Image: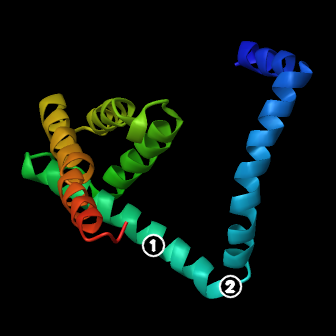
Amino acid sequence: MLAVAVLIVILLGVPPVRRMVTRRLKSLFSNVVPRLLDVLQSPRKIAEGFGGILCLSLTFVVCLYACVRAFGGDTSFTTVAVVYLTANAIGSAAPTPGGLGAVEASLALGLTVAGVPAEFATSSVLLYRLLTFWLPVLPGWASFTYLQRHEAL
């Protein structure tokens, strides 16, 4: 991490690179900041955002717990929630789309450490990722195609 930090400092010391980075970040923040300020000024929108994230996370934990139980794993809901939240944080740091690979490995390892047999943990995680990561692609693709065909996009 130190090497990456030194590389960033060196690159930002070069004026053409610094101008390019500044220009790109300026365009990004010029679009994001006004929308963020609109959200922050409305308590209702803040509550909707937090409520949505909470419900989504809770639904994913319930799905993972159901997958563990379906394969015969016996662990508490709280343990599954902690494993999910930890693996989700690790997946957010992974440089792959959707944390692909890192989330699966973290979930399987976390469940195994929590006492679920490795074969049950692996099967549960693969079923969970199929249900929450891969299967939603099909209706999303169908919806996108439908909306494009009807010139809504």
Asked which secondary structure carries label 2, the reply is loop
- Name the spot of residue 59 as percent of width and height, x first: 31, 65
Q: Quadrant of residue 23?
A: top right
18 vs 27: above or below? above
- Name the spot of residue 72 as percent of width and height, x first: 8, 47
- What colour scheme was applied to this rendering of the protein? rainbow
Question: In the image, what residue occupies the spot 66% across and 85% down?
Answer: 43
Q: Which three-letter amino acid code belongs to the residue tagged 2?
A: Ser
Disc 2 and disc 1: Cα gap in Å? 15 Å
Asked which secondary structure carries label 1, the reply is helix
Q: Quadrant of residue 6?
A: top right
Question: In the image, what residue occupies the spot 71% across and 77% down?
Answer: 38
Marks 2,1: beta carbons within 8 A? no
- For marks 2 and 1 on the same chain, the one whose residue lies earlier in the sequence: 2
Q: Residue 42: give its label.
A: 2
Q: Residue 117: give its label.
A: none
Question: In the image, what residue occupies the spot 25% across and 38% down?
Answer: 115
135 and 92: which is toward the camera: 135
Q: Which quadrant, please, contains the N terminus?
A: top right
Judge from the rendering whether residue 13 lies leftward or rightward of residue 60; answer left or right: right
103 vs 12: above or below? below
Q: Which three-letter amino acid code belongs to the residue tagged 1?
A: Gly
- Name the spot of residue 41 as percent of width and height, x first: 74, 82
63 and 32: which is toward the camera: 32
Q: Which residue is mark 1?
A: 52
- Name the spot of residue 95 as percent of width and height, x first: 49, 30
Judge from the rendering whether residue 64 lies leftward or rightward of residue 38; answer left or right: left
Q: Which quadrant, please, contains the C terminus?
A: bottom left
Mark 2 is surrounded, within 10 Å at the Cα level, by few (under 14), some (14 to 19) or many (20 or more) other residues, namely few
132 vs 125: above or below? below
